Image: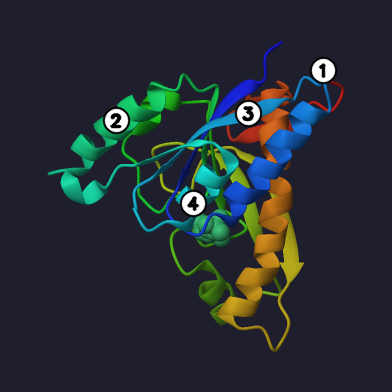
């Protein structure tokens, strides 16, 4: 079977994207594994996103589509949908993509789009998750990979990892600790999806480790 085709959407420095590039290569180097995947394109809504340079270095098609050039959220989402669909993806991964997506985009890739979010959902959807976790007195923080639905940072949870919050943690030290876990669970979730190991029932996802 051919490697699965993955399109990555990003807005920032692209460290999660970098982890996926390395893992995609490793998945294919392993030979005949069912979880092989290739990243066929990276798409950013910000021209200054560091992830675009990473794509070029890795020989991956890189595109920028700025939301600022569209009159409405729906118009942007329709153009983004058409751009992504042209790559015929098996899976779309939001790896630090900092735009709220409407059904115009989400419905086109329902059941085949994953997001990495830097909190233990359903706690702290949205922005500034680490500051919120510290302010709330949480003893643990973490990250979540979930299927994307039209509800922001909602959708069936595929994987989570947690880290302890220590008394001297700041927003940035906590973010750094959580990011290490993001780089671990996102590639694993992508492999599980590509191998057909994810069984979704309502909001619950079972990882069928026998496949
Ligand atoms: C990550 O923490 C991601 O979860 C969040 O934004 C950050 C992006 O980091 N949405 P990077 O661009 O992958 O380095």
Q: Earlier in the sequence, mark 2 or mark 1?
A: 1
Could you say which is closer to the camera, residue 86 or residue 62?
A: 62
Q: Which mark is residue 184?
A: none
Q: Earlier in the sequence, mark 4 or mark 2?
A: 4
Q: Earlier in the sequence, mark 1 or mark 3?
A: 1
**Residue that numbered label 1 is attached to:** 32
Query: Which image quadrant for residue 79?
Result: top left
**Residue that numbered label 2 is attached to:** 104
Mark 4 crowd level (few <14, some 14–19, many ≥20, 10 Å Cα)? some
Q: Secondary structure at mark 2?
A: helix
Quarter of the rendering occupied by the C terminus? top right
**Residue that numbered label 3 is attached to:** 38
Q: Secondary structure at mark 4?
A: helix
Mark 1 crowd level (few <14, some 14–19, many ≥20, 10 Å Cα)? few
Residue 19's place in the image compared with 162, above or below, is above
Mark 1 and mark 3 residues within 8 Å of each other at the beta carbon: no
Could you say which is closer to the camera, residue 40 or residue 147?
A: 40
* Marks 4/2: CA–CA distance: 28 Å
Q: Earlier in the sequence, mark 1 or mark 4?
A: 1
Residue at 72% across / 35% down in the picture? Answer: 25
Residue 34's place in the image compared with 40, above or below, is above
* Marks 3/4: CA–CA distance: 18 Å
**Residue that numbered label 4 is attached to:** 53
């Amino acid at each position: 079977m051919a490697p699965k085709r993955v399109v990555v959407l990003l807005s920032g420095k692209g460290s999660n994207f970098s982890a996926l590039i390395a893992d995609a290569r490793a998945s294919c180097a392993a030979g005949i594994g069912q979880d092989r995947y290739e990243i066929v394109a990276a798409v950013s809504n910000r021209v200054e996103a560091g992830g675009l340079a990473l794509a070029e270095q890795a020989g991956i098609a890189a595109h920028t589509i700025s939301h600022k050039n569209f009159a409405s959220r729906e118009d942007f989402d329709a153009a983004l949908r058409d751009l992504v669909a042209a790559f015929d993806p098996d899976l779309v991964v939001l790896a630090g993509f900092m735009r709220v997506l409407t059904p115009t985009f989400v419905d086109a890739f329902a059941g085949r789009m994953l997001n990495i979010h830097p909190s233990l959902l359903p706690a702290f959807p949205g922005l500034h998750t680490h500051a919120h976790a510290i302010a709330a007195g949480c003893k643990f923080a973490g990250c979540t990979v979930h299927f994307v639905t039209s509800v922001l940072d909602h959708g069936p949870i595929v994987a989570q990892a947690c880290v302890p919050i220590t008394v001297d943690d700041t927003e940035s030290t906590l973010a750094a600790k959580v990011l290490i876990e993001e780089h671990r669970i996102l590639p694993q979730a992508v492999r599980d999806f590509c191998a057909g190991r994810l069984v979704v029932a309502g909001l619950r996802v079972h990882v069928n480790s026998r496949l």
